[in-house]
């Protein structure tokens, strides 16, 4: 053999006896076949066989299997982001003339997709109050193909009565999809509560280190799996085994990370709720959170993401106060090791329900830092607001106070 050829042809080394705990990264576009007949008949390998890198590698299949087990679903498909999980779950099933009902509290890019893209395909979109199965009943009809849930809802944390919504949707022959990113499959299993499709932004808690984007779609029904899988093949969507291995590594510590984040969230919330500048904290584990009873009935725990509503006089100072934070970082996404805050507008993202009160909600994601450092940082933030209000007040009444 010529050296040039030796450079190209990779010898097979012995694998027997090599049994590491970490899953291997199998990179591939091409997968070779033992003979021409095997290549010609490659479709006969079915969805569990290997024929081309786009359709799955042992690394991606390993992650899919782990997710299927956690979700208590039969099948999982990996896609390049959480947003892709949601859009592909819809596109695979929708056709012109269909209608979709979407929870008013849906992740904002999903609303954008539903408003900008679905009408181009002749699909009608309607939004419903996430806390009202009765509104789903009022809006649904025989054309409705998908009822989309996100529980709890993005930013404002309303927990949905998934079993009740699923009962209504199934009576009309509609599928129920649920974005489960906040809870993760550790804390909620939508497929066991009536959903036909569950999506996760693995980007958040499951990967857990703010360095990879990935989403998953899990279903119980084999026919639904095949529908989504063939759609993905035609659209050319798959994920990198390197990224899948990062998610696999992150998932091993999901349980302990979630526990630490939840405990940190409870400590922070306890303190925030007692503060005069905080009007309200939104978090499904709190008794006054819309749908708290449903959370208690259906969920197995809470993550470390919650939202803070400030009293009206504090709102204009929040942005300056965020700049005083030292441990928390300011940024989108959540569920990583680093604690994050992100100010979120709500009103622009609500059409079926009215958001009453001030339009600034601070989303907080507790990470893996020491709880005391996070508490000190939150205190620093609220002291900054207090000082700014105090300065403003003394300017508004310049002499009366002195006299
Ligand atoms: C972040 C998020 C997504 C999107 O995930 P990406 O991987 O960032 O695309 C979808 N749904 C919810 C509820 C999210 O919070």
Image (tube, rainbow, N blue to C red):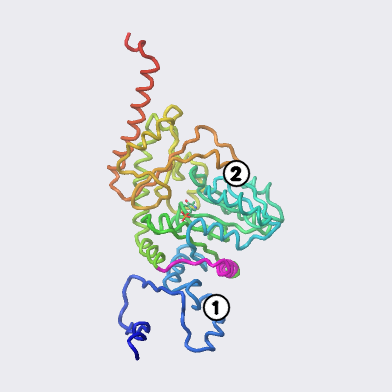
Quadrant in which the N terminus appears: bottom left
**Residue for point 35% across, 45% down:** 329
- Does the residue tagged 1 have its C-beta within 8 Å of any atom of ligand 1? no
Residue 80 lies, in percent from the top left, at: 48, 61
Vertical order, 40 against 267 (above or below): below
Crowding around mark 1 (Cα neighbors within 10 Å: few <14, some 14 to 19, many 20+) is few
Residue 218 lies, in percent from the top left, at: 52, 63
SS class of the residue under badge 1? Answer: loop
**Residue 46 marker:** 1
**Residue 199 marker:** none
Residue 144 lies, in percent from the top left, at: 68, 55
**Residue 129 marker:** 2
Judging depth in this view, the residue of 235 and 305 nearest the camera is: 235
Crowding around mark 2 (Cα neighbors within 10 Å: few <14, some 14 to 19, many 20+) is many
Quadrant in which the C terminus appears: top left
**Residue for point 50% across, 42% down:** 156
Vertical order, 128 against 360 (above or below): below
Vertical order, 126 against 6 (above or below): above
**Residue for point 39% across, 48% down:** 304
Give the total of numbered labels: 2
The furthest residue to the top:
403
Q: Nearer the viewer, mark 1 or mark 2?
A: 1
Q: Is residue 116 left or right of residue 365?
A: right
Q: Is residue 366 magenta?
A: no
Which stretch is magenta? 225-241
State the image quarter where residue 355 is shown. top right
Q: Is residue 381 left or right of residue 149?
A: left
Residue 213 lies, in percent from the top left, at: 43, 58
């Amino acid at each position: 053999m010529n050296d040039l050829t030796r450079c190209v042809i990779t010898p097979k080394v012995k694998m027997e006896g090599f049994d590491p705990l970490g899953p291997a990264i199998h990179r591939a576009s091409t997968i070779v076949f033992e003979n021409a007949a095997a290549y010609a008949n490659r479709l006969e390998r079915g969805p569990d066989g290997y024929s081309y890198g786009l359709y799955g590698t042992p690394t991606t299949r390993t992650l899919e299997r782990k997710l299927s087990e956690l979700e208590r679903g039969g099948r999982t498909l990996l896609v390049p982001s959480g947003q892709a999980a949601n859009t592909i779950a819809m596109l695979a099933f929708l056709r012109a003339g269909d209608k979709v009902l979407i929870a008013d509290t849906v992740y904002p890019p999903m609303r954008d997709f539903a408003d900008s893209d679905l009408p181009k395909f002749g699909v009608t979109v309607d939004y419903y109050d996430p806390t009202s199965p009765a509104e789903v009943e009022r809006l649904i009809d025989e054309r409705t193909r998908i009822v989309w849930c996100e529980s709890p809802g993005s930013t404002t944390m309303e927990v949905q009565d998934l079993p009740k919504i699923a009962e209504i949707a199934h009576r009309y022959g509609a599928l129920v999809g649920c974005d489960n990113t906040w809870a993760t499959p550790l804390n909620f299993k939508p497929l066991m509560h009536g959903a036909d499709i569950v999506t996760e932004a693995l980007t958040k808690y499951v990967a857990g280190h703010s360095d990879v984007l990935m989403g998953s779609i899990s279903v119980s029904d084999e026919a639904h799996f095949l529908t989504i899988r063939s759609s993905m093949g035609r659209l050319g969507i798959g994920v990198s085994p390197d990224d899948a291995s990062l998610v696999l590594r992150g998932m091993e510590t999901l349980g302990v990370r979630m526990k630490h984040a939840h405990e940190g969230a409870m400590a922070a919330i306890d303190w925030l709720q007692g503060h005069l500048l905080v009007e309200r904290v939104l978090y499904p584990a709190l008794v006054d959170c819309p749908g708290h009873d449903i959370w208690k009935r259906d969920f197995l725990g809470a993550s470390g993401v919650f939202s803070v509503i400030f009293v009206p006089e504090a709102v204009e100072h929040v942005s300056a106060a965020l700049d005083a934070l030292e441990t928390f970082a300011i940024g989108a996404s959540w569920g990583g090791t680093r604690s994050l805050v992100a100010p979120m507008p709500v009103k622009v993202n609500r059409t079926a329900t009215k958001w009453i009160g001030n339009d600034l909600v601070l989303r907080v994601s507790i990470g893996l830092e020491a709880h005391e450092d996070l508490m000190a940082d939150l205190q620093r933030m609220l002291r900054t607001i207090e000082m700014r209000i105090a300065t403003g007040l003394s300017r508004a009444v310049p002499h009366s106070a002195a006299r």
